[in-house]
Amino acid sequence: MKFDGPDESMTTFVRPLKYWPDEEADEDLPERKPRILGRADHPVSRKLFSPGSLKVLYRLKNAGHRAYLCGGAVRDLMLGGEPKDFDVCTDAVPDELRRLFRNARIIGRRFRLAHVIFHDGVVEVSTFRRTPDPEDQRNPDDLLITSDNTWGTPREDAFRRDFTVNALFYNIADFSVIDYVGGIDDLRQRLIRVIGDPDVRFCEDPVRMLRACEFAGRLDFTIEQRTQEAIQNNRQELLKAAPPRLTEELLQLLKCGRAGVSVQWMLDLGLLDVLLPEALAMVEAGERGAGDFSGILPILDRLCQEGRELPDVVLLGAILLPRIMLRRYEEEKGQGRLMSLESFRKAVDSTLEPFLQRFALANYKRSSLVQALEGFHRLCDQRFTPGQRVRFASKSYFDDALVLFEILVRATGEGRDALEHWQAARRQRPRRPQPQVETKRRSRPRRRRRRRRGESS
């Protein structure tokens, strides 16, 4: 089974990797001295930072705190890419951050950190942490981390991160890149490697297994052998992860522009059977004669690479549709007639029920997802007149349903004429009136008239 997209979707890097030192990596990582690349030895430039992150880094530095750019921002800048987020880590604790930044708010319980809010975005600021004590967890006998608010040093913080390529620091004090865990070598070798014992780290936080597949796909890296074996051995631990976190990571994977390769890694390592069996229907449907939906993920990747912002409802609907379409095909083949809307709703509900046991959706998103899927079913009906199409195009869920229809048409090559008819109906529909917000007029305070001279009180 292949989910990966065409060759043109492969990641390209802005700069060649010619700045790596020839120094060999020390195998004894916990005891090794950090590798420090001076300003002349790396491509990370402050000109590429977001304005908000620079303000945070310098305010922390000027207040006497250590201030490092960390995580994916350093990784992407080292690879010559453009980071999506600029996260900062420091020795200042959350209460100190709130006093330093009036525009900061403290979020999280399991992992407390600060969001410093600027007009052009949010900078996430975390405090250096170390591996938490088992006694502080909800179940001390389980490796699963439920509380992660034990402050530590930069070295301890680096070793408690997930992968070596995500544990690099950029020090604003001297513009150096600091590597405690061998991340520079793994960037050079294009490897996703877990920091520490993979079996322990995946039991501490099972979502790391999903993130490993996402990073391997997004960066076009390979997953290190021990890390692969640990994912295969511990994949059932994913069922212990919090559904909201799984939902967030799944959506990030689908939006990364390399979802096909990431899902292929999930399939090869056994995660798809545990976490997202619905995706297997993309190929199962073709084997049963219901249509080949294996092109859905490459189409999603192409749309993301083109800059299309796909709603979460569309991304999840595209994953679930092959399973629903397979049920529709089997029912229509058995009954010899088109599937009714009521039967289609039952197929949607039966597909959503096990999916929502693993993932979490707010009620309004669940309702929007159901409406988009039902709208897609209506778009497949060829009996609409041109006037009926225009009226149906005015429905609130029509746009999401039309994007799903477009994805299926581009993935399978079928239904292009119907897609053109629906796109024409969207152009002909009357414009929706913009909601008018009434603004209260500010009443001016009455001014006292000054008494004229000579008037008696």
Image (cartoon, rainbow, N blue to C red):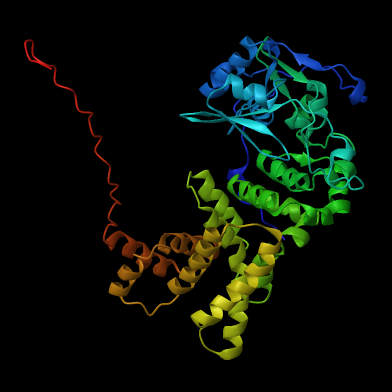
Q: Residue furthest bottom?
A: 335
Residue 208: tell me if it is visible: yes
Q: Residue at x 34, y 64 (%)?
A: 394
Which quarter shows the N terminus?
Answer: bottom right
Residue 82 appears anywhere in the view: no
**Residue 37 location (% of width, % of height):** 74, 14
Which sits in the foreground, 348 or 455? 455
Locate residue 89: give its quadrant.
Answer: top right
Residue farthest left in this picture: 454
Of residues 424 and 346, the one nearer the viewer is 346
Residue in the image at 43% along x and 71% along y: 379
Vertical position of residue 421 compared to residue 79: above or below:
below
Extreme residue in the front direction: 457
Above or below residue 287? Residue 357 is: above
- Residue 56 on image: x %, y %: 58, 20
| Rendered residue at 31%/70% (across/down) | 391
At a point 67% along the width and 47% down the height, the residue shown is 249
Give the percent coordinates (x, y) of residue 434.
29, 51
**Image quadrant where residue 336 sits:** bottom right
Describe residue 395's horizontal placement relative to residue 110 as left or right. left
Q: Is residue 132 above or below residue 296?
A: above
Give x and y (percent) for residue 441.
Answer: 24, 38
